[in-house]
């Protein structure tokens, strides 16, 4: 997204008009230029707070992004052979134990302390 800029031609024309009108109109000229600058600054998107920018930069540097999707995919991939092995060897209780272990791992990962 591009940020709006103050048109340089408009400022040049305003400066030329100021020179022609003389010092009597300095206050009006300054007010007009300040208003244009404020409008330009108000139109820009607000930057993220420094604390959030710092945390995002640290996460990128450490590679600690959100890996929830990877965890979900790996859990599904692990659930297929584990459920087959546990159901064949231990029946329904083994299947329930294997799936409960996978759920416990995912819950622990989701609610782990992040710092």
Image (cartoon, rainbow, N blue to C red):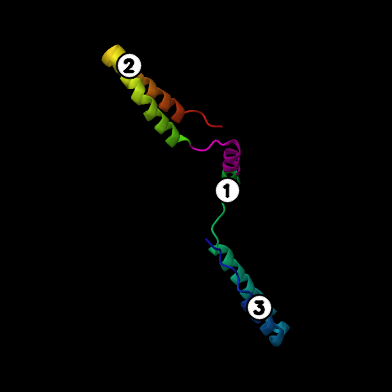
* Structural distance between the alpha carbons of marks 3 and 1: 34 Å
Looking at the image, residue 89 sits to the left or right of residue 8; the answer is: left
Mark 3 closeness class: few <14, some 14–19, many ≥20 residues within 10 Å: some
Q: Please, is residue 41 above or below residue 79 in the view?
A: below
Query: Which residue shows up at 60% across the image and 71% down it?
Result: 6
* Mark 2 residue element: helix
**Marks 3 & 2, CB-CB < 8 Å contact:** no
Magenta stretch: give its range. Answer: 54-66
Nearest the camera: 59 or 23?
Answer: 59
Mark 2 closeness class: few <14, some 14–19, many ≥20 residues within 10 Å: some
Position of the C terminus by quadrant: top right
Furthest-left residue in view? 92
- Marks 3, 2: nearer the viewer: 2
Residue 61, magenta (yes or no): yes
**Residue 86, quarter of picture:** top left
Q: Which residue is mark 2?
A: 86
* Structural distance between the alpha carbons of marks 2 and 1: 50 Å
- Marks 2, 1: nearer the viewer: 2
Q: Which residue is mark 1?
A: 49
Comes first in the chain, label 3 or label 2: 3
Query: Which residue shows up at 62% across the image and 75% down it?
Result: 32
Q: Which residue is mark 3?
A: 29
* Mark 3 residue element: helix
């Amino acid at each position: 997204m591009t940020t709006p800029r103050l048109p340089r031609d408009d400022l040049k024309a305003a400066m030329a008009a100021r020179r022609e009108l003389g010092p009597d109109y300095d206050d009006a000229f300054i007010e007009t230029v300040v208003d244009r600058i404020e409008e330009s600054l108000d139109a820009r998107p607000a930057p993220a707070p420094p604390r959030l920018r710092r945390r995002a930069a640290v996460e990128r540097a450490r590679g600690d992004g959100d890996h929830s999707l990877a965890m979900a995919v790996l859990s599904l991939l692990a659930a297929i052979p584990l459920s087959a092995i546990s159901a064949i060897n231990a029946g329904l209780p083994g299947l329930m134990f294997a799936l409960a272990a996978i759920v416990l791992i995912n819950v622990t990962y989701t609610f782990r302390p992040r710092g």
